[in-house]
Amino acid sequence: MTRIDATFAKLRAEGKKAFVAYVMAGDPDYDTSLEIVKGLPGAGVDIIELGQPFTDPMADGPTIQVAGQRALAQGMTLQKTLDMARAFRETDTETPIVMMGYYNPIYSRGVDRFLADAKEVGIDGLIIVDLPPEEDEELCIPAQKAGLNFIRLATPTTDDRRLPRVMQNTSGFVYYVSITGITGSAQAEAGDVAPEVARIKAAGNLPVVVGFGITTPEAAARIAAVADGAVVGSAIVSRIARGDTPAEVLGFVKTLADGAHSV
């Protein structure tokens, strides 16, 4: 059982939904980013989604694209993202960390080396948005063998013919993208999300968390009510971009977590 599996089991036993927070590693700089990441569990975050900055983030909207550019300009690398996870684990051995990013930096490092390093520093799962199920032999299956969850995205365009393929080697949870398009581009609607979550859950035995388009505590509550959890990224990254202090960012995160946990 991974930390992700254990977290969902604990939340189910408590009758609670998961709150997942996304931050870009190294934004606005390494030390500030690490301070925020270390503070997320205390702000109510159940799972941390740690973005790996990349030069061509095709699934990300402007807010997260610019966050990645800020991080890269500060010298953030894949190695430093791993270092950040290691530093987090010095004080927290329970909160799951999911690394979200793109395949190129992992391929450049070498899959075997990356997986060994990720496991050693305490990464629990991967979301690699540019590797479809047809490429599972590249990273998904090796990651599972290494003890890391490989979390797949499902979208409004994932039809019943495609869904079983998406679910086949997915573990940990399924990340349902509530809108078509890039991050930060529209608002998630619980009425649209609920039947899709039910459809995905019927196709497998995994928790379904919903992200994209959740920007307020009220929206987090509405989405968590119809799913196993809610993910917020762009709204948090926007607070970092405007220069909020770590304490202010974490205060905002707590309001979102409280919303998701209120149902």
Image: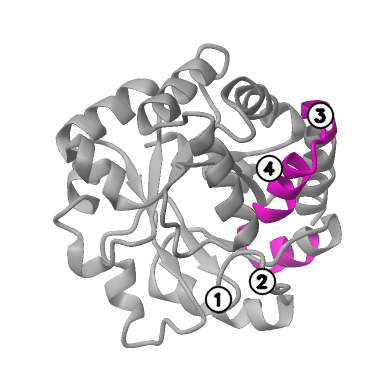
Residue placed at 33% from the left, 58% from the top? 170
Amino acid type at image mark 3: Thr
Real-space Cα distance between discs 2 and 3?
25 Å
Any magenta on residue 243?
yes
For mark 2, what is the residue?
Answer: 185
- The local secondary structure at tag 3 comes to loop
Asked if the residues shown at circle 2 and circle 1 are in contact, with their CB atoms under 8 angstroms apart, the answer is yes
Magenta region, residue range:
221-248
Quarter placement of the N terminus: top left
| Residue 231 seen from this side | no
Within 10 angstroms of label 1, few (less than 14), some, or many (20 or more) residues? some
Amino acid type at image mark 1: Gly
For mark 4, what is the residue?
Answer: 14
Task: Tell us which disc is closer to us: 4 or 1.
Answer: 1
Q: Is residue 154 left or right of residue 164?
A: right
For the stretch drawn in magenta, the main secondary structure is helix
For mark 1, what is the residue?
Answer: 181
In the image, residue 82 above or below residue 14: above
First-in-chain label (4 vs 3): 4
